[in-house]
Image (cartoon, grey):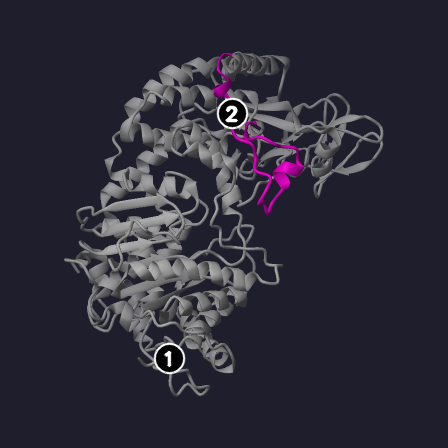
């Protein structure tokens, strides 16, 4: 709908969305994220399919074709969209693609910097020539520090393997804290690489063997190591100590020893299969090469104290203190000498690059840092590095792996690969395509870009946005239960500040304005509700009278939903609809039966009349009925819901009922039921809906209700 403003009644107002078909797109995107959003790591991004769907539904008049809008007709030119808690910026970039003028804020400086850069992706030029120049300046300079013997001939390093060295407080014996003596394995080839616990020889043996018999006469159980469940066992006296207790005793960060290397031939680089790589014990020559890098780093730091990245690890306001307890006090301690040398030289070379090209390369540098630090592990079955934040935590890795950062066709997380990720993101955005439900992509119209206003700031102060000018608020409010994004994101701050992407003031600590609080706090719900109310009051101020506020939310803790209801009521925002929408179906280590894959979308009007949620028997019954209806419908469509999904959906239904005006009756007599169907729109199955949609339509399932109150 071009020209600004929302239709008098939209598909979103009518609750008419093809939820199951959108979920097909979203689930595929969850497995294979869009390149557009892979230029830089952030920890919580909405799916682009979800964002685009909500924008299309909000701007398409009721009775119109959702899919025609999704792939062709939607035009948000003149529409003003706000995301006051933007995170990774997906909502805003998708709105911008459709022509909207966008405003975004977030207290997280890294999220703001990354999101702001995404608005300029379409301007990113070919970075190949700049990368070639950087390789000639930096890559060639550090090449000698990654030289390694390969089958008796000059070669290059792919991976360097380090292991924490621990001294026993009971007997003084110094030993290597290996988690196991198995380093890598290849199921297809039927081989594995084991480490001799005595002499350190790395040897390939049959994958079925449990024991390595070394030429030195030692037998090593490959399944075991010196560390189990975070405790190191002295091989001399049997004394056990937790690795996290070593630093308080020694007063130093962990110490590591180079014990193995993986090498490549020294000829002009090509992509080498595993069979052409060599895993071997680290020799004196490998350690001498590393010492050359250490000496060079010392010389650079003496000549320029700013060569080493600045920044103390914040001690106050932390939820996860493992970094500090393991003995780290400054971010520079999270990098070994060779990594620090490479990063320092590259940062210095980037100082001379300006404009969008320089910004794009700095973003690539920042993302590259997650694969070049002492908290990267090794995925032995894949023979590749596992980056920091492969799970959302600071994991202590007692056997970290170091990557040759200038390889172009080998290795995960090299700087050339990071640059290519930015290039792919730019190309993906400029391609202007959307996936179909059957898997292929089709071109979609790209609207002229509107205004782009992204800021690092708190949503309680939106003074830069005039009163009554925002048409649509599309957001994902902060979680009630604390997730340490500020602590994780702060890892990027020192290098971003060094590169000029962030104000150095952000080095001082975590951002103010975090809403989440400790779950154990007796007043957690009230504190969260009061803080969110302050932000939503400011959001309401900038909204037009006919504006809509649409957000996705999830929480298993009812206190989070209750606090959200209190804030919405206090800000004069009335939820009129809710429905589930597929959010994250991953199967990572944090997934369990109570995990949530289906977010809930809540659709609100801004009427500015304060209300108090009426939580009780009526709202609880409405929420349960809402969840049961959606469970039956989605499972009939082939989706499996966890207990966490069902609980989350029930909370959403109860929230709408609790703020209904007039209140809902227990028997549902005041509940109006409208279609918010997983089926295609009211006009029947569109031609592009695909066989799955047609099959669902033929089932003639009853449409689930969207809980709302009569207006």
Of the residues tagged 2 and 1, which is closer to the observer? 1
Tag 2–tag 1 contact (CB < 8 Å): no
Mark 2 vs 1, N-terminal side:
2
Image coords of residue 465 (percent x, y): 28, 52
Q: Residues in magenta? A: 303-332
646 vs 190: above or below: below
Q: Is residue 319 magenta?
A: yes
Residue at coordinates 83% horizontally, 35% vertically from top-left?
A: 238
Q: Secondary structure at mark 2?
A: loop
Image coords of residue 428 (percent x, y): 28, 42
- Name the side, left or right, on which 252 lies relative to 378: right
* Residue on which disc 1 sits: 661
Q: Is residue 654 magenta?
A: no
Residue at coordinates 76% horizontally, 30% vertically from top-left?
A: 219
- Name the side, left or right, on which 707 lies relative to 283: left
Q: Secondary structure at mark 1?
A: loop
397 vs 26: above or below: above
Image coords of residue 262 (percent x, y): 55, 24
Q: Nearer the viewer, residue 668 or 224?
A: 668
Examine the rendering and report whether any part of residue 414 can be seen: no
Quarter placement of the N terminus: bottom left
- Name the side, left or right, on which 232 lies relative to 69: right
25 vs 416: above or below: below
* Residue on which disc 2 sits: 277
Q: Nearer the viewer, residue 622 or 532?
A: 532
532 vs 38: above or below: below
Image coords of residue 629 (percent x, y): 43, 76
Quarter placement of the C terminus: bottom left
Q: Nearer the viewer, residue 356 or 703?
A: 356
Examine the rendering and report whether any part of residue 357 can be seen: yes
The picture quadrant where one finds residue 237 is: top right
């Amino acid at each position: 709908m071009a020209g600004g403003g929302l239709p008098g009644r939209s598909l979103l107002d009518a609750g008419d969305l093809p939820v199951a078909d959108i979920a097909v797109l979203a689930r595929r995107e969850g497995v294979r994220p869009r390149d557009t959003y892979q230029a830089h790591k952030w920890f919580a991004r909405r799916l682009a399919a979800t964002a685009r769907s909500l924008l299309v539904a909000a701007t398409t008049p009721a009775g119109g074709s959702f899919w025609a809008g999704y792939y062709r007709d939607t035009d948000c030119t003149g529409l003003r969209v706000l995301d006051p808690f933007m995170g990774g910026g997906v909502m805003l970039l998708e709105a911008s693609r459709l022509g909207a003028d966008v405003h975004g804020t977030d207290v997280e400086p890294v999220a703001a910097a990354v999101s702001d850069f995404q608005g300029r992706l379409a301007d990113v030029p070919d970075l190949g020539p700049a990368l070639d120049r950087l390789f000639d300046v930096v890559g060639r300079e550090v090449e000698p520090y990654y030289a390694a013997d390969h089958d008796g001939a000059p070669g290059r390093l792919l991976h360097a393997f380090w292991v924490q060295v621990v001294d026993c407080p009971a007997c003084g014996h110094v030993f290597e804290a290996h988690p196991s003596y198995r380093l890598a394995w290849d199921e297809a080839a039927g081989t594995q690489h084991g480490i001799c616990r005595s002499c350190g020889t790395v040897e390939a043996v049959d994958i079925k063997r449990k024991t390595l018999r070394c030429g030195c006469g030692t037998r090593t159980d490959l399944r075991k190591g010196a560390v189990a469940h975070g405790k190191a066992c002295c091989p001399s006296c049997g004394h056990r100590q937790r690795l996290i207790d070593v630093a308080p005793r020694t007063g130093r960060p962990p110490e590591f020893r180079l014990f193995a290397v993986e090498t490549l031939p020294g000829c002009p680089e090509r992509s080498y299969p595993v069979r052409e790589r060599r895993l071997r014990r680290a020799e004196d020559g490998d350690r001498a090469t590393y010492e050359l890098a250490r000496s060079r780093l010392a010389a650079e730091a003496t000549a320029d104290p700013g060569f080493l990245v600045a920044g103390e690890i914040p001690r106050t306001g932390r939820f996860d203190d493992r970094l500090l307890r393991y003995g780290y006090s400054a971010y520079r301690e999270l990098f070994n000498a060779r990594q620090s040398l490479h990063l320092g030289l590259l940062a210095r070379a980037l100082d001379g690059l300006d404009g969008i090209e320089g910004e794009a390369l700095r973003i690539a540098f920042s993302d590259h840092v997650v694969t070049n630090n002492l908290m990267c592990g090794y995925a032995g079955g894949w023979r590749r590095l596992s980056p920091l934040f492969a799970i959302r935590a600071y994991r202590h890795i007692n056997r970290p792996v170091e990557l040759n950062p200038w390889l172009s066709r080998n290795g995960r997380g090299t700087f050339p690969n990071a640059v290519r990720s930015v290039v792919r993101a730019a190309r993906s955005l400029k391609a202007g395509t959307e996936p179909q439900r059957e898997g292929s992509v089709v071109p979609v119209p790209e609207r002229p870009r509107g205004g782009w206003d992204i800021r690092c700031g708190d949503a309680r102060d939106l003074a830069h946005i005039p009163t009554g000018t925002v048409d649509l608020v599309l957001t994902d409010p902060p979680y009630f239960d604390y997730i340490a994004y500020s602590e994780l994101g702060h890892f990027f701050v020192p290098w971003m500040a060094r590169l000029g992407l962030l104000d150095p003031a952000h080095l001082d600590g975590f951002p103010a304005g975090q809403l989440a609080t400790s779950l154990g706090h007796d007043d957690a719900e009230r504190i969260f509700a009061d803080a969110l109310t302050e932000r939503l009051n400011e959001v309401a101020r900038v909204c037009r009278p006919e504006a809509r506020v649409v957000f996705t939310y999830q929480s298993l803790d009812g206190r989070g939903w209750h606090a959200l209801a209190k804030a919405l009521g206090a800000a004069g925002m009335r939820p009129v609809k809710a429905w589930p929408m597929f959010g994250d179906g991953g199967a990572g280590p944090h997934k369990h039966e109570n995990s949530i894959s289906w977010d809930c979308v809540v659709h609100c009007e801004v009427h500015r009349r304060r209300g108090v949620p009426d939580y009780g028997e009526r709202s609880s019954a409405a929420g349960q009925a809402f969840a049961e209806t959606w469970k039956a419908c989605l499972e009939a469509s082939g989706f499996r819901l966890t207990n966490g999904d069902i609980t989350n959906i029930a909370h959403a239904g109860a929230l709408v009922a609790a703020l209904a005006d007039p209140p809902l009756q227990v028997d549902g007599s005041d509940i109006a039921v409208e279609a918010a169907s997983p089926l295609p729109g009211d006009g029947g199955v569109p031609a592009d809906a695909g066989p799955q949609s047609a099959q669902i339509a033929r089932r003639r399932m009853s449409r689930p209700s969207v809980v709302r109150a009569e207006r």
